[in-house]
Image (tube, helix red, strand yellow):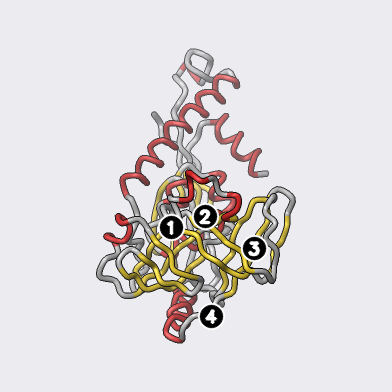
Amino acid sequence: MRSEISQMQRRLGVTSVYVTHDQTEAMTLGDRVAVLKKGELQQIASPRELYEQPVNLFVAGFIGSPSMNFLPATLEGNVLRTAIGDLEIPEDKARKAAGKKVVLVGVRPEFFEDAKLVEDHKKSNGSTFAATLTHTEWLGNEQYGYINFDPAPEMRELLDTLARDMDADELRPQVVVTLDAASRIRGGREAELWLDTRKLHLFDAESGENLTRDAEAGAQLTREAAEERAEEIATAQQADGRGDGGGSAAGAPARREDTTVNAGAGSSGGATAAGGRHTAG
């Protein structure tokens, strides 16, 4: 159904607003996605900008499946002390979080790799640590691994507060990692994992603000998405006989469109809006 709606919207070239509680629909249908929390706008951007450069914890936790892992940590210089090990991070990220005693580390499952499978030239871009996975789930093209951790009491309280803020029942002290299908890591055994620390996010533990967000990089992602979508729409309308000189009503030139979708999440708490809007060009 998503595919049919998307194709129809491009053929018709009309402004569209789509409201949904399903983040997958929002990410696949929207040119721009507006994320709401209890009726308050959190961020509006292209799906890719939301995923790679979220403004805060709520957006980061809502977008993506499996969802982003959150680890309480203390920052000492450019080393994060976490319950799963010490992680050395790039100096520019450490500078942005300087002065914060406690931060929340946001790590997407795909940022991890089996250290044995990481190419030598990549290893310096991340941090290697040892961990014991409780179990793994092999899915054919990839597998998921699970690491339980035991946070200190004050960190446990921080996770509980975060869960309430995100309208979740709880945030389990668990990290989900995505591994290559070729990995031989198995549950119950200690293994070496590699984490691409260039991609992780550091969030303010009190405000939830993304301290390491690169606003300009995010804006560039949204600009590129708009350009790509304009090309897609022009191609779709030409194929439908409605391109330049090709027969839109009264010989009018084809309009350039961009789509806005609205998606809501949570019955009592956070609501998310993802939006795609086509504007006349």
Task: Tell me where residue 79 sits by quadrant.
Answer: bottom left
Residue at point 41%, 69% (across, down): 104
The span from disc 1 to disc 3 (Cα, nearest Å) is 18 Å
Task: Give SS at disc 3.
Answer: strand
The span from disc 2 to disc 1 (Cα, nearest Å) is 8 Å
Residue placed under numbered mark 1 in the picture: 200
Mark number displayed over residue 150: 4
Q: Amino acid at mark 1?
A: Leu
- Quarter of the N terminus within the rendering: top right
Q: Amino acid at mark 4?
A: Asp
- N-terminal label among 1 and 3: 3
Q: Are marks 2 and 1 in contact (CB under 8 Å)?
A: yes
Q: Is residue 78 visible?
A: yes
Q: Amino acid at mark 3?
A: Gly
Mark number displayed over residue 111: 2
Q: Amino acid at mark 2?
A: Phe
- N-terminal label among 2 and 1: 2
In the displayed structure, 53 sits above or below 271; it is above
- Give coordinates of residue 195: x percent, y percent: 50, 57
